[in-house]
Amino acid sequence: MIPPGDARVLITGVAGFAGSSLSKALLALGYSVTGLDVVAPGHAGLLRRELSNPGFHYVWKSIQDIRPDDVEGHSVVVHLAAQPDAPLAFESPRYTVMQNIEGTVALLEAVRQAECVSKLMFAGSGNEIGRALYLPMDEDHPLIPHNPYGFSKAAAEMALGAWRLAYGVPSIVMRSGVVVGPNMRREVFIFKWLWNALHGRPIVVEGGTQTRDLAFIDDVVRAWTLAVQAPVEDVVGQKFFVGSGQECPVDDLAQLCRATIGTNVPIEYVGYRPGEEGHREAFSVEKAKRVLGYVPEISPRQAVALTAEWVRTLC
Ligand SMILES: NC(=O)c1ccc[n+]([C@@H]2O[C@H](COP(=O)([O-])OP(=O)(O)OC[C@H]3O[C@@H](n4cnc5c(N)ncnc54)[C@H](O)[C@@H]3O)[C@@H](O)[C@H]2O)c1
C-alpha cells in the first residue's frame, strides 16, 4: 500500500466530473492533491470546497503546456484531462486528437523528465475497445475503436504503453464505459434522457439495440483510489476494466430513465451514430476484483435512480 503521507497526487482534468469526485475521495483519505485544469478557478464550481482546503492546490493550466516542474513532488499522476465527448469528436476530430493524443504525450514527456512518479493512471474508455470480439471483454481484448473519440483514447493508451517500454514511465490503464452520477456531464445521454423526462420532453434514442456497461461514479472512484493505494508492482503496466460488468441495451436504459422519473414521455428513435450499429459493451471486472479488491456495489438500475435524484435538484 502507498499510504497518503507518502503520495502527493496530481490530477489532470480536476475540474470535471471524475476529477472533482476523485479529489474529494483522495482528500478524505488524507492525500494531498494538486489539480490541473484549463477551467479558471473562479469557474471550477465542482471544487468550491476543495479550493479552500489546505491539502489541495489548483493549477490553472493546459496539459498541452505541462512541464516537468509541474509534476515534481508528485508520486502519483491521474490523467483525466481530455475532450471526452464522442459527438464532439465527430465534428472536431483534429481538436480531439490534439487534446487526447498530443495532450497525453505532453504529460508523458513531463512525467518522464520529472523522474519522481511511481504511478501514472489513465482514464481509458470502452470506445477504445470498440467492436467486441467476445463478451464480457477482458483486458486482453484488442483495441478496435469504432469512432474518432475511441481512436483518440486508444492512441493515447498506446502512447502510454510506448513510453513505458521506452523510458519506464509507470503507467496504469483504468477503462470504463458510461459513468453516471451527480455532476456528470450534461452531454451524456443518460443525463439528457432524465432531464427531458423531467421536463415532459421526448427521450431521443440514437439507435437502440447497442449496449453499454454503465457504472456509478462512486464505484469508479473507489476503484481508482484502490489503484492509488495498491503496491506499485501489482498495478504498474496493468490494465483494468472498471464497470458494472453488466450489458445494458440502450433501449432498456431509455425506458429505465422514463420509469425512474415516473412520466410517460414518448421515446423517439433516430438513426445510429456512425459506427454505432451493432456495438456491444460489457466488461469483465474479475481482474480489478482480484488485484485491486474492486467490487461494483451500485447496479445500473440504482445508478440511474441515484443520478435522477441529483437531476431533480437542478430543476
Ligand atoms: N464520464 C465517462 O462516462 C467516462 C467514461 C470513460 C472514460 N472517461 C474519461 O474520463 C476522463 C474524465 O471524464 P469526465 O467525464 O470527468 O469529463 P469532464 O469533461 O467532466 O472532465 C474533463 C476535464 O478535463 C479538462 N480539460 C480538457 N482539456 C484540458 C487540457 N488541455 N488541459 C487541462 N484540462 C483539460 C476539462 O476542463 C474538464 O474539467 C476523460 O479522460 C474521459 O475520456 C470518462
Image: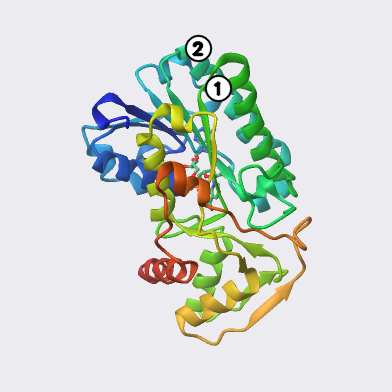
Q: Amino acid at mark 2?
A: Gln
* 174 shown above or below 168: below
**Residue 17, percent from left and from top:** 44, 49
Give the residue pinned by disc 2.
113
Which residue is drawn at the image coordinates 26% and 31% (left, top)? 4
Which residue is drawn at the image coordinates 57% and 79% (left, top)? 255
Give the residue pinned by disc 1.
108
* 273 shown above or below 80: below
Mark 2: give few (<14), some (14-19) or many (20+) Cα within 10 Å. some
**Residue 212, percent from left and from top:** 61, 61
* 283 shown above or below 39: below
Left/right placement of residue 180 relative to residue 46 reads right
Quarter occupied by the C terminus: bottom left
Mark sitting earlier along the chain (1/2): 1
Extreme-left residue of the structure: 54
Query: Is residue 43 visible from the viewing direction of this image?
Result: no
Q: Residue 183 occupies which quadrant of the picture? A: bottom left
Extreme-bottom residue of the structure: 264
Q: Amino acid at mark 1?
A: Leu
Query: CA–CA distance between discs 1 and 2?
Result: 9 Å
**Residue 129, percent from left and from top:** 68, 47
- For label 1, being within 8 Å of ligand 1 is answered no
Mark 1: give few (<14), some (14-19) or many (20+) Cα within 10 Å. many
* 1 shown above or below 114: below
Left/right placement of residue 182 relative to residue 105 reads left
Numbered disc 1: secondary structure:
helix
Q: Residue 40 occupies which quadrant of the picture? A: top left
Quarter occupied by the N terminus: top left
Left/right placement of residue 186 relative to residue 5 reads right
**Visual colour scheme:** rainbow
Asked whether the beta carbons under mark 1 and mark 2 sit within 8 Å of each other, the answer is no
